[in-house]
Image (cartoon, rainbow, N blue to C red):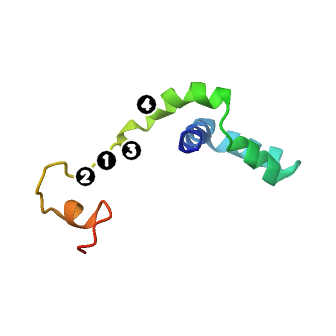
Amino acid sequence: MQKTSLVNRFLYERLGNGGYGHVIKRLAGMDTIRELGRQYRPSFLKSILYPFAAIRYKSRLVDKGCHSDGCTCVWCRCGKGAQAC
């Protein structure tokens, strides 16, 4: 599901405002809930597009926190689900 969501984000970004407006107009003439459900299901096309979307958003997918053992920085103390803060 997360891969599909990432591909959808990639597609909407590539469409721009004009393409996004076209999608909204298209949705207005159909069963919106069912169509959005179909849009957010995994598909063969989205599995093909996923590597491109992953490359585009790679820096956002990488954990930017500290990776050293025994670190006491705010990220290590308060991030990663820690209860210390």
Real-space CA distance between mark 1 and mark 4, rounded to the nearest whole angstrom: 15 Å
Q: Secondary structure at mark 2?
A: loop
Real-space CA distance between mark 2 and mark 4, rounded to the nearest whole angstrom: 20 Å
Q: Residues within 10 Å of mark 4 (few under 14, many from 20)?
A: few
Residue at 58%, 35% (x, y): give it. 14
Going from N to C along the chain, the mark reached first, 3 or 2, is: 3
Real-space CA distance between mark 1 and mark 3, rounded to the nearest whole angstrom: 8 Å
Residue at 58%, 44% (x, y): give it. 1
Q: Which residue is mark 4?
A: 55
Q: Type of residue at label 3?
A: Arg
Q: Residues within 10 Å of mark 1 (few under 14, many from 20)?
A: few
Q: Which residue is mark 2?
A: 65
Asked if labels 2 and 1 touch by Cβ distance under 8 angstroms, the answer is yes
Residue 38 coordinates in the image, percent (x, y): 75, 42
Residue 27 coordinates in the image, percent (x, y): 81, 48
Asked whether, in this view, residue 36 is left or right of residue 48, the answer is: right
Asked if labels 3 and 4 touch by Cβ distance under 8 angstroms, the answer is no
Q: Residues within 10 Å of mark 2 (few under 14, many from 20)?
A: few
Real-space CA distance between mark 3 and mark 2, rounded to the nearest whole angstrom: 12 Å
Q: Quadrant of the C terminus?
A: bottom left
Asked if labels 3 and 1 touch by Cβ distance under 8 angstroms, the answer is no
Real-space CA distance between mark 1 and mark 2, rounded to the nearest whole angstrom: 6 Å
**Image depth: mark 3 or mark 2 in front:** 2
Residue at 66%, 27% (x, y): give it. 44
Asked whether, in this view, residue 61 is left or right of residue 53, the answer is: left
Q: Type of residue at label 1?
A: Asp
Q: Which residue is mark 1?
A: 63
Q: Secondary structure at mark 3?
A: helix
Q: Type of residue at label 4?
A: Ile
Q: Which residue is mark 3?
A: 60
Residue at 54%, 39% (x, y): give it. 3
**Quarter residue 56 falls in:** top left
